[in-house]
């Protein structure tokens, strides 16, 4: 059995790993999708916007339930054997954070004056060069999208509890540990874990705010 | 240095959902000349410039650049033509970085970019503002920066969409001087949309009058102002309301 300090380090490390990989996944998929949505002239654009914004309100327990059914041994993805693993928790977090990244990226890129894209094209930029330049203008907002996704991922408890199972040394993260300690009446420990969780969130956000400062200067 | 191309417009027709229709049967802009497009707001000057830039495709008819049909799909052709808009939109970077943009997208070598940008900033009286964020510039300075980012590319065709419309006389003079100097320095075809009769008289080799999307008159500078063929041109030149 590991010492409390070792457990804390392990839980914090797993929280960081799950949230970090989830945000990496949702950013890799969500930023290009957000750009595509912002530049889209398709009639279905409004419909997609509605879908993405609805996705931002997805209840974590619903995502957890659906993933549980998909990943359970008798479910369609049962062969993956992901239930009660960190991979299932990461997948749940990607699903929950992806709409944030798409919506905030699309909104940031969409807030850059439309005239800029056209004027850059007139200066000889190819459509992709002009799009990249517009994205650069919106980079502060894109960083905000990543920060919001990380915040949601780090503080999420419902879905990771359902598909991760809060197994000690395996799938226990800061949020699920706080819930468990509270249920057991270990309030001091739960508060201590909360302080650690808040500190991690604060450190990550300070880093992102600094990057945003660099992006706008 | 390549020779400046001519622009030829044949049976051009372009319409918008608002009901506005631009219709020009024939308009030739000879290589190396400056054509001033005159006409009131909404006459089709900006629409014509957008079509000449190649980024908007005409509904029907053809625009030819140096004898070849202008196509929005041919980037090498598009890069010979640059448009300076009335209200420039610069990137939220420094003035220098904005001026570098057109050369960077053309993959010009960094040393060459640095040399040309420094020279162009000086040419456009922007050296002192080179490292300032573009968003802090005044209207006149912004237009000079827009002209600098255009001239540094050394386009063959320069399209100017009322670039001095909202500038004070001092900046108007600088813009006119910069375009004149550029024309003296190298072969350049210019199409300049303006409301300003006096500016057209100062800058143009040829002048064309557009009214409600139609080409009313196209003539040499002296002929346009001194012996116009159309009554509406005569009235416009005399300063009377014709719209």
Image (spheres, helix red, strand yellow):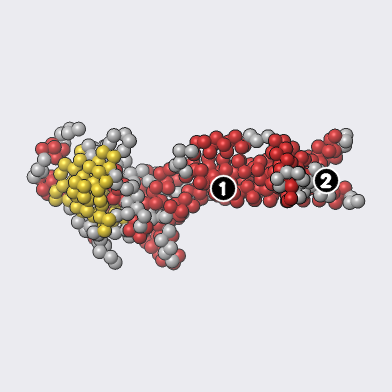
Q: Position of residue B212 (x, y in %)?
A: 22, 37
Secondary-structure class at tag 1: helix
In the foreground, A31 or A52: A52
Residue B7 visible: yes
Residue B180: horizontal and vertical position, in percent?
25, 55
**Number of numbered tags placed on the structure image:** 2
- Left/right of residue B209 with respect to residue A179 in the rendered view: left
Q: Quadrant of residue A180?
A: top right
Q: Residue at x 14, y 40 (%)?
A: B233
Chain of the residue under the numbered disc 1 shown in the image: A
Q: Which mark is residue A167?
A: 2
> Local crowd at mark 2 within 10 Å, few (<14), some, or many (≥20)?
some
Q: Is residue A63 left or right of residue A124?
A: right
Q: CA distance from mark 2 to mark 1?
A: 33 Å
Q: Are marks 2 and 1 in contact (CB under 8 Å)?
A: no
Residue at horizontal 36%, vertical 55%? B73
Secondary structure state at the residue bearing disc 2: loop
Q: Which mark is residue A31?
A: 1
Residue B202 placement, left or right of A193? left
Query: What is the crowding at mark 1: few (fewer than 14 residues within 10 Å), some, or many (at least 20)?
Result: many
2 vs 1, front mark = 2
Chain of the residue under label 2? A
Q: Quadrant of the C terminus of chain B?
A: top left
């Amino acid at each position: 059995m590991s010492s409390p300090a070792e457990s804390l380090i392990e839980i914090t490390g797993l929280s960081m790993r799950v949230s970090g990989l989830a945000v990496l996944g949702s950013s890799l998929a969500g930023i290009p999708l957000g750009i595509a949505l912002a530049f889209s002239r398709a009639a279905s654009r409004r419909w997609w916007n509605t879908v993405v914004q609805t996705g931002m309100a997805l209840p974590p327990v619903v995502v957890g339930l659906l993933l549980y059914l998909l990943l359970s041994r008798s479910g369609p993805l049962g062969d993956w054997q992901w239930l009660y693993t960190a991979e299932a928790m990461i997948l749940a977090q990607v699903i929950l954070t992806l709409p944030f990244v798409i919506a905030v990226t699309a909104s940031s890129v969409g807030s850059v004056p439309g005239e800029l894209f056209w004027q850059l094209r007139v200066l000889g930029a190819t459509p992709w060069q002009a799009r990249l330049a517009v994205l650069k203008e919106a980079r502060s907002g894109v960083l905000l999208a990543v920060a919001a996704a990380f915040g949601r991922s780090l503080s999420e408890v419902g879905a990771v509890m359902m598909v991760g199972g809060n197994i000690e040394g395996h799938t226990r993260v800061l949020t699920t540990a706080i819930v468990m300690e509270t249920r057991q009446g270990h309030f001091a420990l739960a508060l201590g874990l909360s302080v650690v969780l808040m500190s991690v969130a604060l450190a990550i956000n300070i880093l992102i705010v600094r990057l945003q400062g660099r992006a706008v200067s | 240095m390549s020779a400046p191309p001519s622009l030829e417009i044949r049976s051009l027709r372009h319409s918008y959902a608002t009901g506005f229709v631009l219709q020009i049967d024939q308009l030739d802009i000879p290589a190396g000349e400056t054509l001033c497009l005159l006409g009131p707001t909404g006459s089709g000057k900006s629409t014509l410039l957008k079509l000449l830039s190649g980024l908007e495709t005409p509904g029907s008819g053809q625009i030819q650049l140096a004898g070849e049909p202008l196509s929005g799909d041919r980037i090498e052709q598009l890069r010979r033509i640059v448009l300076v808009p009335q209200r420039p939109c610069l990137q939220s970077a420094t003035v220098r970085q904005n001026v570098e943009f057109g050369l960077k997208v053309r993959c010009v070598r960094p040393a060459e970019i640095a040399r040309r940008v420094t020279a162009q900033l000086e040419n456009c009286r922007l050296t002192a503002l080179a490292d300032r964020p573009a968003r802090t510039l005044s209207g006149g300075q912004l237009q000079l920066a827009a002209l600098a980012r255009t001239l540094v590319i050394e386009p063959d065709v320069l399209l100017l969409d009322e670039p001095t419309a909202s500038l004070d006389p001092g900046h108007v003079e600088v813009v006119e001087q910069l375009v004149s100097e550029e024309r003296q320095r190298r072969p350049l075809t210019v199409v300049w949309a303006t409301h300003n009769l006096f500016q057209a008289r100062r800058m143009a080799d040829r002048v064309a009058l557009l009214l409600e999307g139609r080409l009313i008159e196209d003539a040499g500078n002296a002929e346009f102002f001194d012996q116009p063929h159309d009554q509406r041109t005569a009235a416009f030149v005399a300063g009377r309301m014709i719209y």
